[in-house]
Image (cartoon, rainbow, N blue to C red):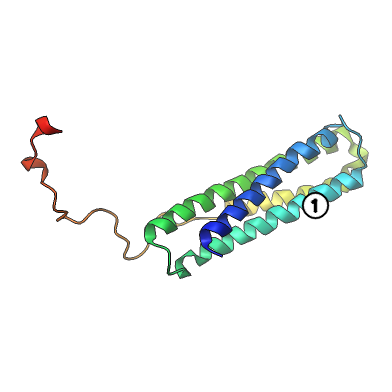
Amino acid sequence: MSAELTLLFLEKRVEASRLCASITEPFATGSEPVKPQQLADDYEQVCQELEGTYEDLKKLNDGLLKDKTLEAGDIRHLRGRIATAVTEVARAAQDMAAQIRFFEAMNPNDAATTKPALDHFDRIDKSTREFTVPDEPEDGAELAPAEDTGMAHEEDVDPMMM
């Protein structure tokens, strides 16, 4: 699968994980009754999806230079999208961790049930901070047009024509 398609699927997985926060929120806030173990299982499933997506994003980022069909501009564009997706992974982990903290504050007797998921979300959030996308251009990438573009130089252009 091409890097663009792979990234699109990963972006949608992150989006789905973020949407899970809206599904679990009524249970975490207590407006809907829930068994703590069921909520913990839901959180763990979202953890696994987020962590898998993050790992896939790292692999995709590391493999961009190996894809000989991509040009330097395409690689920069994809890396920008990857960085955005990693930021969304962090946001999703933070949102879910905040929900768990609220649930634990409202249900101190059930806090131990959701604690593993909270720790997992915190680890995901921390690992995203260590992720870096190189900003520098690739070796041999053209950054600016060549000196001789065939266009008139600035001093040869009539300012009234601009």
Residue type (three-letter) at the residue carrying disc 1: Glu
Taking the spot 23% from the left edge, 54% from the top edge, the residue there is 145
Quickly name the residue at label 1. 44
Taking the spot 44% from the left edge, 52% from the top edge, the residue there is 77
Left or right placement of residue 99 versus residue 11 in this view: right
* x and y percentages locating residue 126 in the rendered image: 64, 51
* x and y percentages locating residue 133 in the rendered image: 49, 55
Mark 1 residue crowding within 10 angstroms, few (<14) / some (14–19) / many (20+)? some
Left or right placement of residue 108 versus residue 149 in this view: right
Quadrant that contains the C terminus: top left
Q: Is residue 118 visible?
A: yes
28 lies above or below 123: above
80 lies above or below 60: above
* x and y percentages locating residue 26 in the rendered image: 82, 33
Quarter occupied by residue 9: bottom right
Left or right placement of residue 74 versus residue 41 in this view: left
Query: Which secondary structure, mark 1?
Result: helix
Q: Is residue 93 visible?
A: no
Q: Nearer the viewer, residue 72 or 119?
A: 72
* x and y percentages locating residue 85 in the rendered image: 57, 49
Left or right placement of residue 2 versus residue 110 in this view: left
Taking the spot 58% from the left edge, 46% from the top edge, the residue there is 87
Taking the spot 42% from the left edge, 55% from the top edge, the residue there is 76
